[in-house]
Image: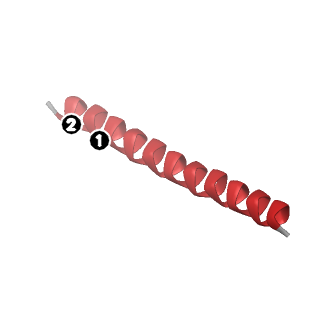
């Protein structure tokens, strides 16, 4: 029973890491867009 448990934990860790990466990418993209907007206003 330990092998399915380990596989489940590994998949869960990959899923959580992937979500954090996508969230970080979204924040970086938003910051870049805001910087472009601010530069265009000047």
Q: Is 39 placed left or right of 6 in the picture? A: left
Residue at the (32%, 41%) spot, across then down: 31
| Location of residue 19 in the rendering, given as x and y in whole percent from the top left corner | 56, 54
Q: Are marks 2 and 1 in contact (CB under 8 Å)?
A: yes
Question: Furthest residue to the front?
Answer: 2
Q: Is 35 placed left or right of 11 in the picture? A: left
Q: Is 19 placed left or right of 26 in the picture? A: right
Q: Residues within 10 Å of mark 2 (few under 14, many from 20)?
A: few
Q: Quadrant of residue 15?
A: bottom right
Question: Furthest residue to the left?
Answer: 42
The alpha-carbon separation of the residues under discs 2 and 1 comes to: 6 Å
Above or below for 3 versus 39: below
Q: Is 32 placed left or right of 12 in the picture? A: left
Depth check, front residue: 39 or 11: 11
Residue at the (75%, 59%) spot, across then down: 6
| Location of residue 5 in the rendering, given as x and y in whole percent from the top left corner | 77, 66
Q: Quadrant of residue 16?
A: bottom right
Determine which residue is flagged by label 1.
Answer: 34
Q: Secondary structure at mark 1?
A: helix
Q: Secondary structure at mark 2?
A: helix
Determine which residue is flagged by label 2.
Answer: 38
Name the colour scheme: secondary structure
Q: Quadrant of the N terminus?
A: bottom right
Question: Furthest residue to the bottom?
Answer: 1
Q: Quadrant of residue 41?
A: top left
Q: Which mark is residue 24?
A: none
Depth check, front residue: 36 or 17: 17
Residue at the (46%, 47%) spot, across then down: 26
Above or below for 31 versus 39: below
């Amino acid at each position: 029973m330990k092998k399915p448990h380990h596989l489940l934990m590994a998949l869960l860790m990959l899923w959580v890491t992937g979500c954090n990466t996508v969230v970080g990418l979204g924040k970086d993209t938003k910051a870049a867009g805001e910087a472009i907007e601010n530069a265009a206003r000047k």
